Image (spheres, grey):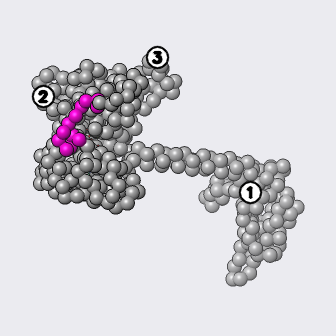
Amino acid sequence: MLEDILNYAYEGYVLVDNQGKIVKMNYEKLMGIKEEDALGKPVEGVIENTRMHIVVKTGVKELRDVQRIQGHDMITNRIPIVKNGRIIGGVGTVLFKDVSEVKELAHQLLDLQSKINKYRGEIERIQGTRYSFDSIITRNGKMEYLKKVGRKAAESNSTVLITGESGTGKEMFAHAIHKASYRKAEAFIPINCAAIPRDLLESELFGYEGGAFTGARKEGKPGKFELATGGTIFLDEIGTMPMEMQAKLLRVLEAKEFERIGGNKKIDLDARVIAATNENIEEEIRKGKFREDLYYRLNVITIDIPPLRDRPEDISLLAENLLEYLIKEMRTEEKELSPETIKILRRYSWPGNVRELRNVLERAINLSSKTLILPEHLPERVLNRINYNLGNKEEVEPLKDIIREAEKEAIRKALILTNGNKSLAAEKLGIHRTALYKKMEKYEMEDYY
Ligand SMILES: Nc1ncnc2c1ncn2[C@@H]1O[C@H](COP(=O)(O)OP(=O)(O)OP(=O)(O)O)[C@@H](O)[C@H]1O
Ligand SMILES: [Mg+2]
C-alpha cells in the first residue's frame, strides 16, 4: 500500500542511504530504468543530474529545484532523512515531469483568478447599492409593522408581493428581504417586466437554447430565473406582465421547474420570488388584465406600502435623513432645512413619494448657496403653484428643443396626475408603455419629477 501511495503521489521518487546508494526507487515512467537494476548503485551513476548524494552529505534540503532529465526540466524535492541528529539517508521526489506542466497550471490558476475577480465584480455590480431593513427609515406604525413582516418573510422561502405607489420603497423592501435571508450571499436578480418588450420577456425570464429562434445567440442564454438560482428574483412591475406570460409564470411557480425556450432540460426553480407592482392588481383582475390565480399564488405574503402622504410623520424624518445622505454623496458642505421649508414639505401631497422627496432635496441642495435651505429652493409644484406651461420666453428656440421640452413636460404632467403609474401615464399620453420608458430614459427622467 505504501508503495502504491508513493507511486501515485509522485511522478518518480528515489530513496538513498547516507552514502548516496539507492535503497528504493521508481523512475521507470520517467527514464525507463527498472528498480532491480539500480538497487545498491550510487545514485549519481543512475539518475541524470541528481544531487541526492550531495544532499545526504550537506543535510540541506533542496525544494522545487529544476532538474534536467532526458531533455525535460523536472521539478524535484530533495530531503535528507535525519535520525537522532545523524543523516541516515535521503529521499528525492519528482513533482512535475516537465516545467511546462507547471506553467500550464500557473496559467490555469491565473485564469481562474481573473474569472473569480470578474464574477466578484459582477456580483457587486448586481447587488449594487444594497438596502437593508435598517436603511428603511420610518416612524410610522404601519411601516414599522411592515418591516417586521418583511423580516419574518426573509426567514421563509415564500413568495412576497410588494405593492405601493411609485417611489414608496418597494425595491428597498425587496433588497432588504433578500439581504436578511439565507440567500444573501447569492445573486439578487431584478427584472422590470414593464421595460422589456413583450415578445422578449419570455426569453429574458427563462433563457433560450442555441438556435431556438432567429436572432438567438448560437450558444444560448440563461434567463433571469436561472441566474437567480440559489438567490432571489425580483419581478418588478409584475402588473404589466402580458396574460400569456402570466399563465406561463404560474405554471413555473406551481411546478417549481422550467426549461429554456427551445430546450428540453428541466431546471429546478430554486429562487425566492419577490414581485412588486404599483398598479392596483385587484382592479386589474376585475378588468381581466391580471390572472386571479397568479395573484393568489404570488400573494403569499403581502407588503402594502402606504404612500408618503398617509404617513406625514415620516416626511420631516425622511427629509432630514435624505438630506444628510445626499450631502455626503454629493460631497457638498453641511446644509439645513429652514423651519418654513419643513412646513411646506409636510403640506405637499408627494405623488412621487419618497423618490420625489429625494429629488426635491437634491435640487434644493444645488440651488441653495448658503447653509439654509429656504422655500425658494423648492420647485413650484411643491409650493403649490403647479405650472405646466412652457413659459413665456421671448426668443424663439430650435423646434427640436421646444418639442423636447414639451415632451418632457407632458410626461411629467402625466406622471404627476397618475401618481407615477407609468402604465396609466402611457395610456393617457397615447403611447406604448415601452415607448414611455424609452423617452424617460432618453430624457434622463428615470426618477420622478
Ligand atoms: N423608507 C425609506 N427610507 C429611506 N429612503 C427611502 C424610503 N423609501 C424610499 N426611499 C428612497 O426612495 C427611492 C425610491 O425607492 P424605490 O426605488 O424602492 O421605490 P419603488 O417603490 O420601487 O418605486 P417604483 O415603483 O417607481 O419603482 C429610493 O432611492 C430610496 O432611496
Ligand atoms: Mg421600483
Give SS at disc 3.
Answer: loop
Contact (Cβ within 8 Å) of mark 3 with mark 2? no
**Nearest the eye: 404 or 50:** 404
Q: Which residue is depicted at the point 13% across and 51% down? A: 312
Q: Residue furthest right?
A: 45
In the depicted structure, whether residue 398 falls above or below residue 236? above
State the residue position of label 1.
75
- Indicate the position of residue 263 as horizontal and vertical percent values: 41, 24
Estimate the spatial distance between the alpha carbons at disc 3 and disc 2, rounded to whole Å: 38 Å
Q: Which residues are magenta?
A: 380-391
Q: Is residue 392 left or right of residue 105?
A: left
Q: Main secondary structure of the magenta part?
A: loop
Q: Gap in Å between the C-alphas at discs 3 and 1? A: 53 Å
Identify the image quadrant of the N terminus: bottom right
Q: Which residue is under mark 2?
A: 283
- Per the image, label 2 sits on a secondary structure element best described as helix
User: Is residue 389 found inside the magenta-colored segment of the image?
Assistant: yes
Snapshot quadrant of residue 428 = top left
Mark 3 vs mark 2: which is more N-terminal?
3
Residue 429 in sight in this render: yes
Residue located beneath label 3 in the image? 214
Residues at marks 1 and 2 touching, judged by CB atoms closer than 8 Å: no
Counting from the top left corner in percent of width and height, residue 331 is at 41, 57
Q: Nearer the viewer, mark 3 or mark 2?
A: 2
